[in-house]
Amino acid sequence: MLKVEAIIRQEKVNDVKNALSNAGFLGITVYDVKGRGRQKGYVLNFRGREMRVDLIAKTKIELVIDDKALDEVIKIIRENAVTGNIGDGKIFVSPVLDVIRIRTGDRGKEAI
Amino acid sequence: MPIDTGDTAWLLASSALVLIMTPGLAFFYGGLVRKKNANAIIMQCFACILLVSTVWVLYGYSMAFGPDVGGFVGNLDWAGLNGVGLEPNEGYAATVPHQAFMIFQAMFAIITPALIIGAIADRMKFSAFLIFLLLWATFVYNPIAHWVWAIGGWVRGLGALDFAGGTVVHINAGAAALVGALYLGKRRGFGKDPMLPHNVPFVVLGTALLWFGWFGFNAGSALASGGLATSAFVVTHTATAVAGLTWLIISWLHKGNPSLIGACTGAVAGLVAITPASGFVGPLASIAIGAGAGAFCYAAVQYKNKKGFDDALDVWAVHGIGGTWGALATGIFAEKAINAAGNNGLLFGNAAQMIPQIIGVAATWGYSMVVSFILLVIINKTIGLRVKPEEEAVGLDLGQHAEEAYVD
């Protein structure tokens, strides 16, 4: 089992979410996050005073999947989150030791 | 007649009350949009105060209320408030300084274009908006205000009754809103992405400020302190409460939930509908007008949702339809016993009053839609109306203003 964490543009979250659910990946967790990558931030202007904001608001989508689904999930996320500009985000993949469904006590793949 | 201090005090207080409606509207609209566009829509409302106030003194008041040219518009004799001094103008308001009447009218000229903003929310360039605002205030608001309210105006000459601006303010803005929403096209992602109101308490705050300010709008339109102002105050309050209650109940029965935004929208619909009638009808008539406003405007919102055009914050349904109902209801429920300067309506044996009411409504719809459309096309063909798609995606606060409503 793998955990996929995708940090994407806020305005792309609906497209990614809908595409994932259409492909059968219903369970996701979504966070509002802030961070910095190569996009570096932007300049705001309050009462004539410029301020650099270098932590940019992004959305993180997290889901746990079977190893075999990884390529499909990555494809779905990339297709729906890409604009081609700097700041489209990143996908991190890491192993998951176990999953437990709290209601039933199911473990492992059954519980995803 | 000499200046009456009570009348002057009430009209100046009313002017301040009507001014606060525009920031109130900004909160109403600001709460209804997504948080990435909150500053931008509040900014558009605020810009109406800044720009319209300036041009109102320069030439706007003269175009709207100055010496008549063919029943259509005022000439520029009063430009720069030339001759508009501290002595009363007997024709408009005989007991207050002319400048008090002028500044009261300025507040109406400010809020009318601000109402349109709800229809074109979240997708118009601020530069294009400012140009539209200037042209619309000049070529749509000023002439229609002249037709209906100015000495020599042709709609006023027909005997049409519009106490505080059902045609001039609400139908006028609602008609322009419909054209604007259709011509600009839908917001990006409309019908696909959830576009939820980002702050419902702001909507309630805005509604409260509108309701509060509307006492100046309607009761102030008596242009005097006393019986007529009191009557207008009472029917304004009553119709608003009834309309909010009506909307609440209808939407509850229809959708299964009693919605706070619905109750607020219904109250605004009631304020709109009672506006033209407020100086001519009694308390029981105001209950009928409020109930009609809640029901008709609710139906109009459902119709819009079914048709799928993106009048984002329902300006057409609330102001266009609410204003039309109010203008026609004035012709139904008006009675001379309330205001001797008015007339009796349909229910009081004068069915003929419906004719000037209908002509006033139709002329306002027609002129506002046609001229608004022409202005939008001109701006679109020159500098363009819409923001870039990526600006719309990231939100107008950052895209247009580099200033976010919520930074942390």
Image (cartoon, helix red, strand yellow):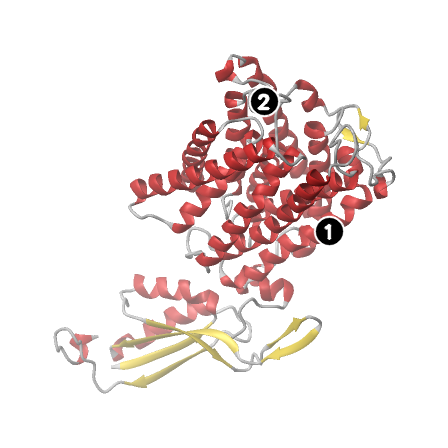
Letter of the chain that mark 1 sits on in the rendering: B
Q: Can residue A43 be seen by looking at this rendering? A: yes
Letter of the chain that mark 2 sits on in the rendering: B
Determine whether the residue tagged by mark 1 lies in a helix, strand or loop. Answer: helix
Quarter placement of the N terminus of chain B: top right
B131 or B330: nearer the viewer:
B330
- Residue A89 % position (x, y): 47, 76
Q: Residue at x 47, y 36 (%)?
A: B239
Side (left or right) of B34 relative to A44: left
| Amino acid type at mark 2 | Gln
**Residue B164 badge:** none
Q: Which residue is mark 1?
A: B51
Q: CA distance from mark 2 to mark 1?
A: 31 Å
Q: Earlier in the sequence, mark 2 or mark 1?
A: 1
B197 or B294: nearer the viewer:
B294
- Residue B347 % position (x, y): 48, 17
Where residue A17 sits, quadrant-wise, is bottom left
| Above or below: residue B353 compared with residue B300 | above
| Above or below: residue B200 compared with residue B229 | below
Q: Which residue is mark 2?
A: B357
Side (left or right) of B237 relative to A23: right
| Above or below: residue B359 compared with residue A75 | above
| Above or below: residue A23 compared with residue B313 | below
| Amino acid type at mark 1 | Leu
B309 or B255: nearer the viewer:
B255
